[in-house]
Structure formats: structure tokens, C-alpha cells
Amino acid sequence: MTQALLKDKYEYRRRLPHYRKDEGAVFVTFCCGCLDHLSESVRDIVVRNCLHDRGTKAMIHAVVVMPDHVHLLLTPLRDLDGNLYSLIEILQGIKSASAHSLNRALGRSGPVWQEESFDHVLRSEESFEQTVEYIRQNPVRRGLVTRPEDYRWLWVG
């Protein structure tokens, strides 16, 4: 594969390759970088920030904000010129806005999230449904609730 094709197919940020597939759903995980855990009030802030621009830069399908990480299932959208918003641009907006809001609420400053995130391009409808269910069940697996519906920081659209 030529360098130009590799560059189009992959976006590199720091150490992890981030695969790009036009108009495909992407499962993303990002973790706290400097806080031991996200308090309940802070998780409210993070959920709001994850959903703030839904339908603008990305279609948000599911979000869960756990005490130490966030899972998102999203599909990037196109801008007015028809260009697909990059995953980096979408996540930078979410992580930056939530970090500013969180720092303001806690009276602190500095980074909140690890710079790297994990992302996985979904390849089928079955995978999409499995990923939504994985996100829904995350608080149950961690023993935070007995039913996904009881977890306040879960949103499925």
C-alpha cells in the first residue's frame, strides 16, 4: 500500500493508529488522566458535554460515563462543504469542553483526560447492536447497578 493510501486510511495521533471509515459507526473509549474517579456531579457534566453537539459533528448512538472512563458509540457527520468531521476533531471538542466544565466545577485546572483514546470501527449491524449492549451493561458488569436502566450516566438514543 502506498504512503498516500496509508495516510488517507489512518490518522495517527501520538502512538495509536486511528482507522477512519467514511460514514461508519465508531466505538470510542477515553479514560481519566489525573483524577482517581469522576464523582457523580462530574459525571453529569461529562454526559451533558458528550451529548451537547449530537447531530452537529456526530450522531451519538450511546454514551456511558463510568467513574474512570467514558464509552461512546458515534457516527461522524459531514460539514456544510461535505467533508467528514474527523474523530480527532469530534473527541477534542467533547474532551476539551468537558475538561473545562469539570475543572470549573471542581475549582481546579489542568488536564482531565488521557490524550490517547481507543477507537474501533464497527463493521456490521450485529456488531453495532453488540456494542450498544456492551455500553449498556458496563455499569452492571462493574457492580454499580443491577439493571442498566438504573445507571444515571447511561444514554442510548
Image (tube, rainbow, N blue to C red):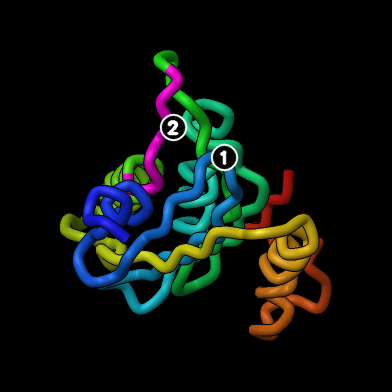
Q: Residue at x 41, y 34 (%)?
A: 85
Q: Is residue 86 above or below residue 116?
A: above
Identify the disc placed on residue 84.
2
Q: Is residue 49 above or below residue 79?
A: below
**Image quarter hosting the C terminus:** top right
Q: Residue at x 51, y 26 (%)?
A: 56
**Image quarter hosting the N terminus:** bottom left
Mark 2 closeness class: few <14, some 14–19, many ≥20 residues within 10 Å: some
- As drawn, the residue found furthest toward the front would be 1
Task: Give the residue type that dot 2 points to.
Answer: Leu
Considering depth in this image, is 126 or 97 the residue closer to the camera? 126
Kindly indicate the quadrant of the structure image that contains residue 140.
Answer: bottom right
- Count the labels in the image: 2
- As drawn, the residue found furthest toward the left would be 110
Q: Residue at x 22, y 55 (%)?
A: 3
* x and y percentages locating residue 27 in the rendered image: 56, 60
Are dots 2 and 1 in contact, CB under 8 Å? yes
Q: Is residue 94 above or below residue 70?
A: above
* x and y percentages locating residue 146 in the rendered image: 81, 78
Q: Residue at x 47, y 65 (%)?
A: 29
Q: Quick one: label 2 or label 1, which is nearer the N terminus?
A: 1
Tag 1 residue:
23
Residue 52 visible to the viewer: no
* x and y percentages locating residue 21 in the rendered image: 50, 48
Task: Give the residue type that dot 1 points to.
Answer: Glu
* x and y percentages locating residue 63 in the rendered image: 61, 54
Q: Is residue 95 left or right of residue 23?
A: left
Kindly indicate the quadrant of the structure image that contains residue 97.
Answer: top left
Secondary structure type for disc 2: loop
Q: CA distance from mark 2 to mark 1?
A: 8 Å
Which range of residues does the magenta coloring cover? 82-88
